[in-house]
Image (spheres, rainbow, N blue to C red):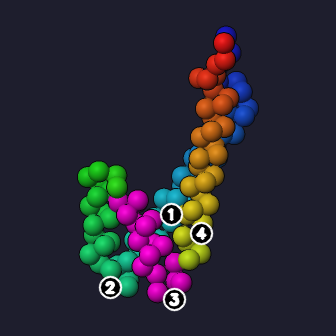
Amino acid sequence: MASSLDNPLFLIGLAIIVLSSLVSFFCFIRVLIWMFQNDETTWGTVCLVLTFLSGLGPLIGYVLGWTLPREGQLRPTMGIWTLSIVVTIVGTILVIATSGAITTQ
């Protein structure tokens, strides 16, 4: 039986997931920097603490990134972050579909 690693689509899906996750990470860092520079220190601290305690910091940062920006300062970053989330989902579907985990009988 062939390994999933022999399937080029599986490897492409993994690469898509890794790259889009890195983009998401940098967008989260950009939102945190914006929070600390624009008198949203409390929210920035909450996001940082919850990232390490429960992993919910990026989710809160994502929601606040769309709701807090003044004059659309974060709109480009949030658009990129949203696109990277969609691309991560597509990569995950590709990996699942080509991994052989789903079989038909």
Dot 4 lies on which element?
A: helix
* Res 84 → quadrant: bottom right
The quadrant the C terminus occupies is: top right
Mark 3: amino acid? Glu
Q: Earlier in the sequence, mark 2 or mark 1?
A: 1
Q: Residue at x 52, y 78 (%)?
A: 74
Q: Is residue 79 left or right of residue 30?
A: right
Q: Earlier in the sequence, mark 3 or mark 4?
A: 3
Residue 79, numbered circle: 4
Looking at the image, do the residues carrying marks 2 and 4 touch, with CB atoms under 8 Å apart? Answer: no
Q: For mark 1, what is the residue?
A: 26
Mark 2: amino acid? Asp
Residue 71, numbered circle: 3
Mark 4: amino acid? Gly
For the residues labelled 1 and 4, the Cα–Cα distance comes to 13 Å
Q: Residue at x 45, y 72 (%)?
A: 65
Q: Earlier in the sequence, mark 2 or mark 3?
A: 2
Dot 3 lies on which element?
A: loop
In front of the other: label 2 or label 3?
Answer: 3
Q: Looking at the image, is 46 positioned above or below residue 74?
A: above
Q: Earlier in the sequence, mark 1 or mark 4?
A: 1
For the residues labelled 1 and 3, the Cα–Cα distance comes to 21 Å
Q: For mark 2, what is the residue?
A: 39
Q: Is residue 4 left or right of residue 52?
A: right
In front of the other: label 2 or label 4?
Answer: 4
Mark 1: amino acid? Phe
Q: Earlier in the sequence, mark 2 or mark 4?
A: 2
Give the magenta range.
57-74
